[in-house]
Image: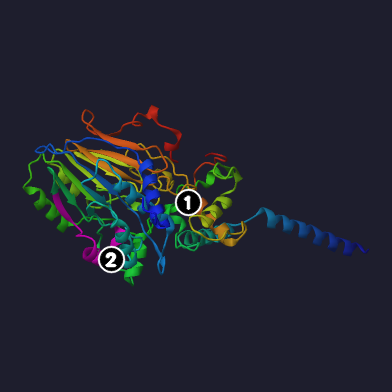
Amino acid sequence: MPKILRIIILTIVSLTFAASAAVCDEFTKDDLKQWNAQFMSSVKEGEKLFHSSLGRNTVSCDMCHPNAANTHPETYPKFQKQLGKVITLGDMINWCIINPLEGDKLDLDDPKMIALEAYITYERRGVKLAPGKH
Amino acid sequence: MKKNLTRRKFLKAAGIAGAAVAMPLSLVEFSWGRNSQENFTLAYVSDSHLTHIKGGQFVRNFDMGLKKAVTEVNFMRPKPDFVVFGGDLAQLGKKAEIDHGLEIMSRLRYPVKWVVGEHDYYLDLGQYWSEKVSKLHYSFDHKGVHFVVLNSILTYDNWINRWKSPAERMHQMARLDNPQGSPFMVRDRQIEWMKKDLSGLSKDTPIVVMSHSPLYKIFKPWNFWTEDAEKVQAVLKPFSKVTVLHGHVHQILYNQIGNISFQAMMSTAWPWPYPVSYAQAGNAVPKLTVFMNRADPHSERDATGWSIINLDNGRVINDFKLWENTNRTLRYDDKLGYPVDTKYQNPADRIPPQEHY
């Protein structure tokens, strides 16, 4: 390989590494803003779902949980004494959709479920994690 | 017994027998009022939130709460002189919901005194309620006690007029945690009426005010709040024995401000969290209150119920009938000058379920 070609290749390789390292390590204030905006749009969607009828009887989550109070996302996963096992927040949301709301459960990775979790957790921001607490 | 006992009749009889066994005995003797040695008791049922789905369908859970209260009140001993309904019979003020509520309440064997709630009011601004149910504010005397019923869920005219339709206005007011909500008010016209209503009474006449919202300020974001509460309190100030009984908050909540005792009634439909469990806003939840037990969502009647109210020499004794919990009693303590829970008032006597976070 001619020397000049080796230099070119080495330069490209090192530049590539440098560039990829920069992509991973660095982000701007604009990036943060954008990512937060993405999260907040999920929170907003969750707020809408939380205040709408997710089942068949017009009952909505906020009727028992204004501002998502008394949902205690900071305590999950926990042993849910009424179900006799350790469950996630999503499982408990589904319990509420099936029972008081008389609806069908959501997949745990359903964007609606994620939005509900985003809203519930956001309304509880600042509260210390307390996994397992009843 | 007749041979042709139908299934329906049998179920009815069995239901009555069952209810009679389940009824706690609340045998309390009370003397009411300065000029009267007559004893009397009343029942207080509140916040049934009957919710229309479509056609003849209503939310089963909430129907069951009100029906249970009606059955139990009918078995009260001593018999109540009357029943108070504390407001929010309906969820969205629909005629279908109010009619449905009147039908269930018509099974009561006692006369009913009605308080209007925001869920009954904001669809048509109280028109159907006034025609079919009751006046929105009024007063009456009973065995030496003066009762005042207020419509405390009024609000600013510009909020009332800002919505595209009555249904939208109702939905906006029905959402408890609505950032676009508007605070409850009694408003000057009604306060003036109240002043006149009380003007002829001697200052030691026991007074019981019944409103839907608490006539003091606890937590504005959920309208546990009456904007002009201080003006109402000022009118009541000259009287030595004043109790305000209110609904709206769906929880055990009591307070003493100067000469006035405040007590909240349970909902028959569902409980609400205490504002202390919302981490993003400050609150003025009374320190005096020993909280009700945290609700178990898997038991749909938990943290719901109704009250037997007795007045002991003009002071309220409130027996909470808590369907899935131990019953509790609030009694005015003459030495301390405020109502206390007869079992749990001392912090050392409280139990873990009473801790809310």
Mark drawn on residue A123: 1
Task: Please identify the residue farthest to the front as the structure is shown.
Answer: B3
Q: Which residues are magenta?
A: B117-140
Q: Where residue A123 appears, x then y in whole percent?
A: 47, 51
Circle 1 — which element? Answer: loop
Q: Which residue in the protein does label 2 denote?
A: B160
Name which quarter of the figure residue B41 lies in. Answer: top left
Q: Where residue B224 appears, x then y in whole percent?
A: 32, 50
- Is residue B135 located in the magenta-colored stretch of the structure? yes
Task: Please identify the residue farthest to the right as the structure is shown.
Answer: A1
Q: Nearer the viewer, residue B307 or B351?
A: B307
Name which quarter of the figure residue A51 lies in. Answer: bottom left
Circle 2 — which element? Answer: helix
Q: Nearer the viewer, residue B324 or B235?
A: B324
* Residue beneath the point at 43% across and 40% down: B356
Asked whether residue B25 appears in the rendered view, the answer is: yes
